[in-house]
Image (cartoon, rainbow, N blue to C red):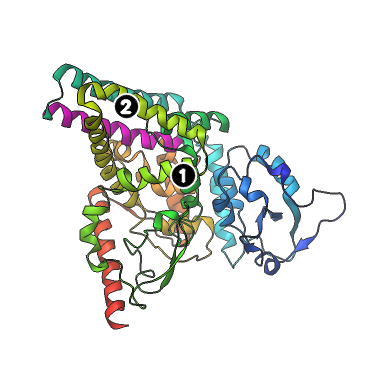
Amino acid sequence: MGKGGNQGEGATERETPMPTFSWEEIQKHNLRTDKWLVIDRKVYNITKWSSRHPGGHRVIGHYAGEDATDAFRAFHRDLDFVRKFMKPLLIGELAPEEPSQDHGKNSQITEDFQALRKTAEDMNLFESNHLFFLLLLAHIIVMESIAWFTIFYFGNGWVPTVITAFVLATSQAQAGWLQHDYGHLSVFKKSTWNHVVHKFIIGHLKGASANWWNHRHFQHHAKPNIFHKDPDVNMLHVFVLGEWQPVEDTLNYSSWNLCGMASRYGKKKLKYLPYNHQHEYFFLIGPPLLIPLYFQYQIIMTMIVRKDWVDLAWAISYYARFFITYIPFYGVLGAIIFLNFIRFLESHWFVWVTQMNHIVMEIDREPYRDWFSSQLAATCNVEQSFFNDWFSGHLNFQIEHHLFPTMPRHNFHKVAPLVKSLCAKYGIEYQEKPLLRALQDIIRSLKKSGELWLDAYLHK
């Protein structure tokens, strides 16, 4: 939840008994025009207010008709403050005979996970080391300075240009991981300070939009690897993922101003591309093009269409700084080419790191699992090392990050043993693998999904 709740609908708490609802009734209110959800057994009507939700209307709408308690705790740092804005949305509570979990979710796992979270809080694992994040910012600024000095001192020949491009791509990748920390409110206790620094890093250091990132990325965290809810598995007909999509009917959609398109793959003989070769053409149109082509266009158009002038101003400050710095060495056209080459290099880094934890896991329709089980089904880890931590921005601890999005990344390794213990108790697989194998599994997963599509396309 967030600011703006005082303008919503619903009944405030009264001394008289509150209305009670069954899960059967609550689950009827899961439409775009009619949305209820449950937090700590309290029922809230978020229908009109969801459009004012700071995290975006989609992420909160994905929990319509469901219990959102663990998601609510995962995304917000100051729960008492946020609850003040929820009071006008309150319309009742679960009937006493109703379980706290919907759709038969495992209440015992939920209780144990909440106890685990309390243990992590008692261990101060949600407290950040500000020197850690300051050093990360400093090493990004140092790389930016080295890049300029290389061109200034050695000239704009091929060798200095290529070296500088790799240095700047590295700084961009690291800035991407750092903005991710502030975007998740994992650095400062006050959300406001996290938002301010987030806009500076993603806007001035990367030329992107904080609001675009928030609205997209929080959906991914709320419902990872769930078709129709996680925008990261919306591949716009370019790839088919998992074991269900290549064979069955799906509904491809985009969370950013693209119309929904009914799409049918294997069984319906739908062939936008030769998906049985997607593990091969992935190298041509996946890592090389995601940031310089798709993301860059999507970010700019989103800021303009949504009239997000603050984010646009931050982004313009990045481009102004870049071109003022490098046009004297390369000219206008040369600087534009140079920028896109940097984006091209960064895109490879970003795609391989972000996909090694998710694309290889279960990707399916909404299974209605508890928070702990749903995150474990959609994420896996890569072994810890100093290089792996730095290279991936600690997203090698993807499991812990998804379970505790507001936890500072330098504490993931401390909570990991507790997570492993809870997984062992319930027989839930905790996947952890070497970096090279994790990268190879991306290709294996794409190949497997492509083969499933071909079999359904030819024989079903």
Q: Taking 358 as reference, is 164 left or right? A: left
The quadrant of the image that shows the C terminus is bottom left
The kind of residue on which mark 1 rests is Thr
Which residue extends farthest top? 153
**Residue holding disc 2:** 322
The quadrant of the image that shows the N terminus is top right
Quick one: 121 or 453, which is closer to the camera? 453
Is residue 418 visible in this depiction of the protein? no
The kind of residue on which mark 2 rests is Phe
Helix, strand or loop at label 2? It is: helix
Please tell me which residue is depicted at 24% across the width and 58% down the height of the picture. 443
Is residue 448 visible in this depiction of the protein? yes
Which residue extends farthest right? 16
Helix, strand or loop at label 1? It is: helix
Neighbor class of circle 2 (other Cα within 10 Å; few <14, some 14-19, many 20+) is some
Quick one: 25 or 435, which is closer to the camera? 25
Distance between mark 1 and mark 2 Cα atoms: 22 Å
**Location of residue 360 by image quarter:** bottom left
**Magenta segment main secondary structure:** helix
Neighbor class of circle 1 (other Cα within 10 Å; few <14, some 14-19, many 20+) is some
Q: Taking 300 as reference, is 10 left or right? A: right
Depicted 40 relative to depicted 177: above or below: below
Looking at the rendering, the stretch of residues picked out in magenta corresponds to 159-181
Which residue extends farthest bottom? 459
Please tell me which residue is depicted at 14% across the width and 19% down the height of the picture. 154
Depicted 97 relative to depicted 12: above or below: below
**Residue holding disc 1:** 302
Please tell me which residue is depicted at 15% across the width and 20% down the height of the picture. 155
Residue 352 horizontal/vertical position (percent): 28, 48
Q: Taking 372 as reference, is 322 left or right? A: left
Please tell me which residue is depicted at 79% across the width and 48% down the height of the picture. 12
Residue 104 horizontal/vertical position (percent): 59, 68
